[in-house]
Amino acid sequence: MLAQAMQKIRDGDSAYAGIAVQDMPCLFACQRHCTVHVRGTGKVGYVLGDFTPDEDAARAILDYAVRHAESEEGVVRYADWPQGVKGHFIVRTPPEGFVCS
């Protein structure tokens, strides 16, 4: 339901045209359901959860995704986070190919 809400909002607002919304059956975050993974090529990604599957949550996630996409490394200043995503971050994921040495 959350993915559908996100797609509906994205399709109705050109501000979100550059944001892809893909449905994934499970992110193995059972205790934090209604979970999303925000990511971009060469950027740090984030898994966020505990959302209510409604339009308010969908818009907050999309607003964050736009800021993430506009950032150079995937890092969005806390002051720029939409209120609706604060408190929903579960984990940060490294960019693809990142290897610790």
Image: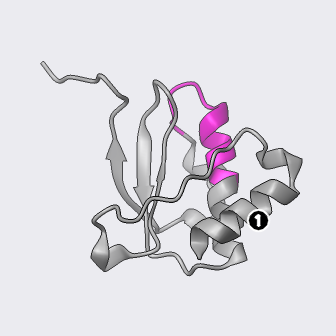
- Front one among 67 and 3: 3
Residue at 59% over, 66% down: 3
**Magenta span includes 54:** no
In the picture provided, is 6 more to the left or to the right than 50?
A: right
**Magenta span includes 64:** yes
Residue 4 x, y percent position in the rendering: 65, 69
- The image's colour scheme reads one colour
Residue at the top extreme?
101
Residue at 86% over, 59% down: 12
Residue at 67% over, 63% down: 6
Query: Disc 1 marks which amino acid?
Result: Lys
Residue 86 x, y percent position in the rendering: 53, 65
Residue position marked by numbered label 1 in the rendering: 8
Residue at 20% over, 22% down: 99
Main SS, magenta residues:
helix
Q: Residues within 10 Å of mark 1 (few under 14, many from 20)?
A: some
Quadrant placement of the C terminus: top left
Asked which quadrant contains residue 49, the reply is bottom left
In the picture provided, is 56 more to the left or to the right than 77?
A: right
Q: Above or below — where is 34 with respect to 71?
A: below
Residue 27 x, y percent position in the rendering: 34, 61
**Residue stretch in magenta:** 63-75
Residue 68 x, y percent position in the rendering: 59, 40
Badge 1 marks a residue whose secondary structure is helix
- Front one among 3 and 84: 3
In the picture provided, is 7 more to the left or to the right than 15?
A: left
Quadrant placement of the N terminus: bottom right
